[in-house]
Image: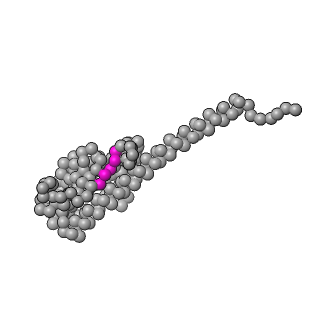
Amino acid sequence: MKLKGFTLMELMITLVVLSILATLAFINFTSYLASKKLETMAFRIYKYLNYYKIEAYKKEASYIIKISSNGQYMVVYDDRNKNNVVETADDPVIDTFFVYKTEDIGGTGVYLEASSNLINNGIVFNADNLGFPPANSGSMYIKHKRLGDTKYYKITIPGGLNKINFYRFDSPSDSILLN
């Protein structure tokens, strides 16, 4: 009587094929997670900016949002004297929004890149000006360190009463307006 079954070679080949498939699935899953973290953070930043723009008009206030030079956080100042300049003694911090660049505990891998005038001057929402000064218009990019320039979001902040535009880029030349 001869027993039927798999040879050791057949089992090894099966295990190698399964491990290759599992590795490919894991790589795709981590890219998917990075893409979702980026999307979530981009929408949160967009909502955050719109919230303070609306609040400035509702409360007839002036807010300055400063972006850190390393792209890890934004700080909102209450510009009480409405001079569109942050003076730490006169303009208290009312909110801080963290965007974690590292993927350590609590980190997302997402970071901001902003035009130099936004980093230097901040984003100003001033109800008295019915908008923000033209010097404070510009763009910010929300990126993920794993995805680089393959997928990212762009928020443009125009002068005056124009709306804040929100774009998704699936490649450097392929953009979709989301709002």
* Residue at the outermost top position: 9
Image point 22% across, 48% down: which residue?
119
Image point 17% across, 53% down: which residue?
135
Q: Is residue 81 magenta?
A: no
Residue range highlighted in magenta = 97-101
Count of numbered circles in the view: 0
* Residue at the outermost right position: 1
Which residue is at the front of the view, 112 or 149? 112
Image point 12% across, 58% down: which residue?
90
Image point 34% across, 45% down: which residue?
101
Does residue 16 lie above or below 94 as drawn?
above
Q: Quadrant of the C terminus?
A: bottom left
Which residue is at the front of the view, 174 or 70? 70
Q: Is residue 179 visible?
A: yes
Q: Report x, y in % for residue 113.
A: 29, 46
Q: Is residue 159 visible?
A: no
Secondary structure that dominates the magenta span: loop
